[in-house]
């Protein structure tokens, strides 16, 4: 689906293109602001367009943004000067190239680059409308190399800005906050990020970030309080807060992933494919997560991971049988020296993204006898997609990009409020004939590949498979089948290595002797 590109804001020359009013202090901005949602910057969708004049800029132009307070032009220095804010070379020639248009998302970044006299290399293409800039790198003052640390920060900011939606006009009127990919580890880098990419945070978190900065700078708090506040801010800023829009998913590829992971279960796969088609139509996640309910060993967790692959999202898993306190999910208050964020917030931090698949294993095994109540109840606000509050972060965390997929053996042990938050998919056990096919086509080949054996080195006859099915007829799922396959393959490998035979064939009698 093509990105929507909005028309230029109509503004008069010599006015502030962001607000439509004269610039502060008598200084005016002459650029026009373009509202875009293009995700990839290119000459057709540039970060900005520069006025070239008689002498065209080279494809890679080194220089600085000038007019630090109200930066509106690029001084092309060719790497001969570090920060010639006058815009004139030694012969008095004007080096300035006015910014004609700029993508709304990058306005604050351009001002930050100007205010900090960052030497940059602009990559662009000369066109009729001007020099279309689609890449910015931070370089050494002479333009001979990349400033590694600063450039990593710059590329991280550009990536997040390009994937964000354009800020609303009211956001542009506010002052910039004084207040692979680089982590924001220190206060200075966090301040820089807020100054040039503030609007990438959810609205409520922008105000929360300001309060956190003020708290960190305060002289009235203890070092322990400052450490907690800085840690919380670091966690929030290192998460890529994405919008609600989800790109279309290839249904053919989705079905291929399901067939690769699981044999049979056509009704289950059909239900998941219906969810994929729904996402493709609405470009948003469904209002309800999935609850995969069924006996042990049938592949519920495997199916959950397949959903994450299909959605192309990072995933995190949580084993509810190991959670005995709701505080483990929602975090502990900062009044404690050893306070920390909860497992839900840690999931965002570890993935680095607000859009994740949250796999909740064994939801039915949550500790209902905990002194602080059933930990599973802490999931309710997460599942409502209205956000939840982590006690350590002390801020409402948006969850509209979280897709929960839970597994359970016995759904009758799950409370009604939790059940109502899921679309339930009941997964039946496999039939004996399905288990026969799974052993022959999936379990045995998988084990042989893992052990580095060729298929002809370990052959199991059909009557031998009957014996295996008889052995595990009272067991649900297919885990026992894979364990049996591994037992047979290991025995075959032992015979090959110790007796010199080239292959081993197992009949019913041999299998019965080995397994019973």
Image (cartoon, helix red, strand yellow):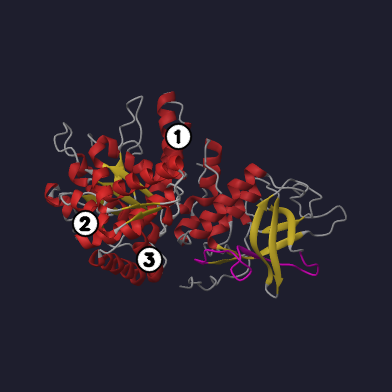
Q: Position of residue 39 (x, y in %)?
A: 52, 63
Relative to residue 456, is residue 466 drawn left or right? left
Q: Marks 3 and 1: in contact by CB < 8 Å?
A: no
Give the mark nearest the N terminus, 1 or 3.
1
Q: Which residues are magenta?
A: 35-57
* 120 drawn magenta: no
Occupied quadrant, residue 335: top left
Height in image: 377 above or below 62? above
**Element type at mark 3:** helix
Using the numbered discs, state the Cα–Cα distance from disc 1 to disc 3 in whole angstroms.
Answer: 41 Å
Q: Which residue is mark 1?
A: 230
Q: Which residue is nearer to you in this view: 243 or 351?
A: 351
Q: Which residue is mark 3?
A: 254
Q: Residue at x 27, y 68 (%)?
A: 270
Q: Residue at x 23, y 67 (%)?
A: 267
Relative to residue 339, is residue 14 drawn left or right? right
Which of discs 3 and 2 lies nearer the camera? The answer is: 3
Which of discs 1 and 2 lies nearer the camera? The answer is: 2
Give the mark nearest the N terminus, 1 or 2.
1
Q: Position of residue 336 (x, y in %)?
A: 32, 26
Relative to residue 238, is residue 284 drawn left or right? left
Kindly identify which numbered label has been placed on residue 422: 2
Q: Position of residue 147 (x, y in %)?
A: 68, 44
Q: Residue at x 38, y 55 (%)?
A: 445
* 37 drawn magenta: yes
Q: Residue at x 40, y 63 (%)?
A: 245
Magenta stretch, main secondary structure, is loop
Q: Tally the marks.
A: 3
Q: Alpha-carbon neighbours of circle 1 within 10 Å: few (<14), some, or many (≥20)?
A: many
Height in image: 116 above or below 331? below
Residue 488 in view here? yes
């Amino acid at each position: 689906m093509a990105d929507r590109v909005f028309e230029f804001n109509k503004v008069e020359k010599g006015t502030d293109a962001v607000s439509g009013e004269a610039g502060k202090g008598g200084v005016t901005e002459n650029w026009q602001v373009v509202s875009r949602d293009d995700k990839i910057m290119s000459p057709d969708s540039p970060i900005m367009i520069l006025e070239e004049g008689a002498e065209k800029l080279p494809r890679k132009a080194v220089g600085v943004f000038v007019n630090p307070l109200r930066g509106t032009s690029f001084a092309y220095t060719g790497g001969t000067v570090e920060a010639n804010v006058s815009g004139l070379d030694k012969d008095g020639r004007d080096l300035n190239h006015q910014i004609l248009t700029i993508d709304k998302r990058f306005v604050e970044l351009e001002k930050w680059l100007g205010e900090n006299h960052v030497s940059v290399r602009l990559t662009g293409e000369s066109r009729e409308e001007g020099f279309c800039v689609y890449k910015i790198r931070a370089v050494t003052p002479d333009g001979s190399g990349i400033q590694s640390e600063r450039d990593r920060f710059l590329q991280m900011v550009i990536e997040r800005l390009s994937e964000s939606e354009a800020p609303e006009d009211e956001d542009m009127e506010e002052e910039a906050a004084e207040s692979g990919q680089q982590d924001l580890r220190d206060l200075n880098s966090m301040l820089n990020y807020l100054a040039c990419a503030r609007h990438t945070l959810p609205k409520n978190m922008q105000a929360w970030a300001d309060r956190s900065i003020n708290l960190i700078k305060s002289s009235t708090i203890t070092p322990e309080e400052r450490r907690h506040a800085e840690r919380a801010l670091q966690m929030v800023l290192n998460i890529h807060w994405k919008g609600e829009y989800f790109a279309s998913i290839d249904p053919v590829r989705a079905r291929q992933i399901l067939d690769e992971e699981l044999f049979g279960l056509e009704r289950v796969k059909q239900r998941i494919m219906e969810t994929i088609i729904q996402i493709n139509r609405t470009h948003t996640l469904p209002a309800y997560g999935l609850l995969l309910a069924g006996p042990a060993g049938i592949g519920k967790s495997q199916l959950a991971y397949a959903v994450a692959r299909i959605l192309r999202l990072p995933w995190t898993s949580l084993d509810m049988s190991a959670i005995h306190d709701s505080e483990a999910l929602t975090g502990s208050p900062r009044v404690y020296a050893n306070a920390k964020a909860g497992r839900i917030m840690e999931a965002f931090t570890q993935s680095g993204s607000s859009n994740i698949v949250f796999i909740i294993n064994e939801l039915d095994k949550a500790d209902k006898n905990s002194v602080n109540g059933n930990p599973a109840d802490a999931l309710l606000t997460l599942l409502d997609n209205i956000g939840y509050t982590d006690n350590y972060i002390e801020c409402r965390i948006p969850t509209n990009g979280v897709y929960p997929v839970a597994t359970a053996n016995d759904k009758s042990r799950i409370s009604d409020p939790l059940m109502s938050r899921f679309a339930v998919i009941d997964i039946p056990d496999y039939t004996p004939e399905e288990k026969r096919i799974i052993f022959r086509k999936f379990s045995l080949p998988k084990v042989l590949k893992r052990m580095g054996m060729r298929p002809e080195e370990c052959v199991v006859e059909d009557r031998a498979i009957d014996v295996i099915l008889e052995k595990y007829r009272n067991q649900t799922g297919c885990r026992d089948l894979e364990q049996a396959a591994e037992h047979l393959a290991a025995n075959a490998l032992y015979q090959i290595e110790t007796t010199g035979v080239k292959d081993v064939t197992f009949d019913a009698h041999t299998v019965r002797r080995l397994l019973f």
